[in-house]
Image (cartoon, helix red, strand yellow):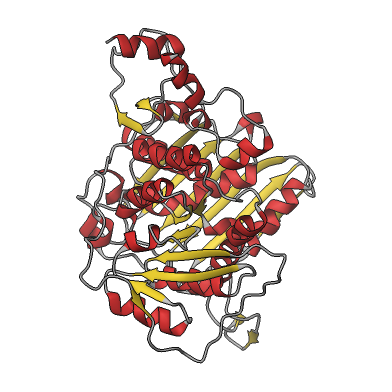
Amino acid sequence: MKFIVAILSLGASLLVQTENAVAFSSFTPKSSFGVKTSASRSSLSMNVETNDDQKTVKVGVIGMGRIGLVHLEAITKAPGVVPVIVSNPTVSKAEAAANQYNIPKFTDDAMDVINDPEVDAVWICSPSQFHADQIKACAAANKHVFCEKPIATDLAETVEAINACNEAGVKLMIGLQRRFDQNFERVKQAVAAKEVGEPIMIKLCSRDPAPPPASYVKGGGGIFADMAVHDLDMTRFLAGSDPVDILAIGSTHIDMSIAEFDGSEKYDTASCIVRYPNGVQAMIDVCRQSSFGYDQRAEVLGTKGMIQTDNVYPNTAKIYKQDYTGNADMPFDFFLSRYNEAYVTETIAFCDSLVNDKPVPCTGTDGLIALIMAIAADKSAAENRWVKFNEIVQEVYCSSPTECELIAQDDMFPEGFRPTEKAEDLLVPDVDKMKNGAVMGSFSDRFKALFK
C-alpha cells in the first residue's frame, strides 16, 4: 500500500484500457533444426549499394509469409542494409527465402534471429500474438525493431513493449503502411504546406473487396482494431495533432454468420466521427465488402480549397463504349498489390533511419495512439456515446515502465485524481528524443525518483 500511495503522490502512474486483453504468447520452441546455412543460391544477386564510408547494418527477418517476403525484398535493395538470417516456423519457407535472396542463414526459431550476434536490427513479421514478446526480446538483446502492426492488442502490453525498447535505447518503428502510400502522402504534404488553407474537415473511406472468413473475424479484436485502425491513424496523420474524442456506430449487412459475435466483431460496417483541436472534424466509414475492389479514398477540406484522392487502379487506361465510359480495369483487389509500393517505402525509410541514424518516421507512440483510438471507437459503439481518448489512457496501472496491468475505474485513486491524460506521457522517451534533448521529466525518471 505504501508503494501505491507513493505513486499517487508523484502523479506518475500510467493508465490505459482495453476490453480484449490478450495474454502474453510464447515463442516457437527451439527446433532440432537449429540455424541452417543456405546451401544453394538463386541467380538473384543482392542489390545493396555500399561504400567504404557507409555504415552497414545487418538485419534479420522473423516471418516468411507474404508480408515478410515483401519487406525482405525491399531490404535487399536498400543501401547499407544486409539481411543475414530469416526465420519461419515452417522451416522450408525460411530456406526458400534464404535461397532466393542469397541469405546465409535460416531457421525455424524466431529467437535465433533475435539472439544472432551479427544482427543489428530485426523485422518482426510474425502473427500478431507474438509481437509484444518478440519486441521485448529484441530490446533485451539490444536490437533495433521494425514491427508490423499491432504492437499488441492489449494496451498495457503495448506500453510495456514500447518502453522496453525506449529504456534499452533501441529504435522501434511500427508498420502503419498507409502513411507511406504516395496518394495519402500527397494529401499530407498539401495540409502541411497549407495549400488548401487551414483544415476544416477530413473524410476517409476504407472498403475491402470481400469479407474475411468468420474464423478470422472471431478473436480478431473487432472492426475498429482490426480494420479501421488504419483510417483512425490516417486522420491523426492528416490532422497533425492528437484527437480529443470519438463517436462510433456499427452494423451487420454482409456476413450474417458473425452477427452474434461479441463486441465490434459482429460488425462488418462502421462509421466514426473524430474531433480534433480547433474544431477540426474527421469522418470515417469502413465496410468489409466492396464488390468492385479496394475503395480507399481520402479528402481534406480547408479554408482555401480541397484535396482528395481516388482509388488506385492497375493502369490509367480508359475505355469509351456505347454502354460504358470509365476505367478500363477495376481497382486493385489484393492488399499487397494495392499497397506494395507503400510497404517497400516504409521498409526503406526504416533502413535509412538505421544506416544514417535518423528518427524513425512512424514511432511506438504512433502505434500506441492508433490502438487507443480503436479501443475508444469500440467503447463508443458499445455504449452509444462520445468517448474521450483520455478515458482509455487512464485505465492502465504500471508499477514500472515495463510492468503494466489493466484496472477498472474504481476507488483505487482519490476523487479528482487522474494520473495522466496524454498517451505519450505513458512512455519513456525514445532513443531519438533522447538524442535531440527533447526530454522533460520522463516517466522512468519520475518513477526512479521514488526510491532515491
Q: Is residue 395 visible?
A: no
41 relative to 429 in the view: left or right? left
> Where is residue 118 drawn, in percent x and y?
47, 63
Asked where in the image residue 320 lies, by quadrant, the reply is bottom right
In the picture as drawn, the residue positioned furthest to the bottom comes out as: 43
Where does the N terminus fall, quadrant-wise?
top left
Name the residue at 44% across, 46% down.
271
How many tags in the picture? 0
Q: Quadrant of the C terminus?
A: top left
Residue at 47% x, 35% y is 246
* Nearer to us in this view, 350 or 305: 350
Percent of width and height locating residue 204: 55, 52
Percent of width and height locating residue 418: 43, 16
Examine the rendered structure and indicate whether residue 39 appears above or below residue 161. below
Q: Is residue 344 above or below residue 132?
A: below
Q: Is 25 on the left or on the right of 310, as rendered?
A: left
Q: From the viewer's side, name the closer residue of 160 and 312.
A: 160
Q: Is residue 421 above or below residue 71?
A: above
Residue at point 47%, 71% (across, down): 84
Q: Determine whether, in the image, residue 190 is placed left or right of residue 142.
A: right
Front in this rendered view, residue 318 or 206:
206
Residue 313 horizontal/vertical position (percent): 58, 75
Q: Residue at x 58, y 58 (%)?
A: 350
Examine the image and state in which quarter residue 277 appears.
top right
Residue 133 appearing in the image? yes
